[in-house]
Image (tube, rainbow, N blue to C red):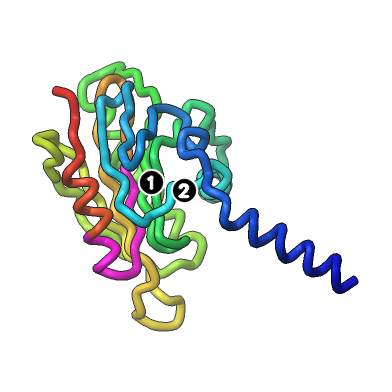
Amino acid sequence: MKKINTLLFLLILISSCQQLDPNKQIDEGKVEKNSYSSKEIGWTINIPKGWKVTSKEQHERHQERGKVAIEEMTDTEYDDSGLKNLIGFQKNQYTMFNSTSESFKLEYEGEWEESNAAIKELIYNTYISKGIKADSTATKIVKIDGLDFHSSKFVLYHPKSDEVLLNQIIFSRYINGFDFNVNINYNNEADFKVMLDAWKNSKFKK
């Protein structure tokens, strides 16, 4: 039994030390060294040194939890089959950068802006419906490499106090026929600065 336990421990240790192939963790784009590029979005970002690329499995777990929460909130079935996970990187489960894209065909002027505002409201209402204390700020425009992004912030609190558990900032833009979103979650300012600097130094093909 002791030998079996030792073997299991070694297998777990080896598994945890294995490096994931970053190009197998994304649905679109390419990772080369510490840089990710999306051909569809025309976007390039450098992955901070020492941060690990988020696994596809973790992306899918988060996506499924969000889908279930939205479906319970709206009592409708949400189709996320067109959603693509782009690059994600993290320090831990509370400090992470994630990006997604989804094809969005405009049928009238202002449609994307209406949809984006509705999604922000849905996110906030979903938190509240789950008994999570949350605040949201007014959407503002932030420039990234000269492009305007809609930026929305949510703050989640401890259920029995005003202690901040998590900050979430979502940057959104309609680009090249896609609804493109960057999500930054953080619980400390130092790691937030690392992610924000990487994002602000992004480059987009004009």
187 falls in the magenta region: yes
- Cα gap from disc 2 to disc 1, whole angstroms: 8 Å
Does residue 104 sit above or below 122 in this rendering? above
Location of residue 125 in the rendering, given as x and y in whole percent from the top left corner: 41, 55
Question: Which residue: 33% across, 42% down?
Answer: 34
119 falls in the magenta region: no
Location of residue 114 in the rendering, given as x and y in whole percent from the top left corner: 27, 34
Q: Looking at the image, do the residues carrying marks 2 and 1 touch, with CB atoms under 8 Å apart?
A: yes
Query: Considering depth in this image, is 80 or 12 the residue closer to the camera?
Result: 12
Residue extent of the magenta highlight:
182-193
Apparent side of residue 74 relative to residue 203 in the rendered image (left or right)? right
Q: Is residue 70 shown to the viewer in this render? A: no
Amino acid at pointer 1: Asn
Question: Which residue: 53% across, 44% down?
Answer: 20
Q: How many marks?
A: 2
Does residue 137 sit above or below 24 in this rendering? below
Location of residue 202 in the rendering, given as x and y in whole percent from the top left corner: 20, 39
The label number, if any, that marks residue 24 in the structure image: none
**Residue corresponding to mark 2:** 54
Question: Which residue: 19% across, 52% down?
Answer: 197
The label number, if any, that marks residue 98 in the structure image: 1
Of circles 2 and 1, the one toward us is 2
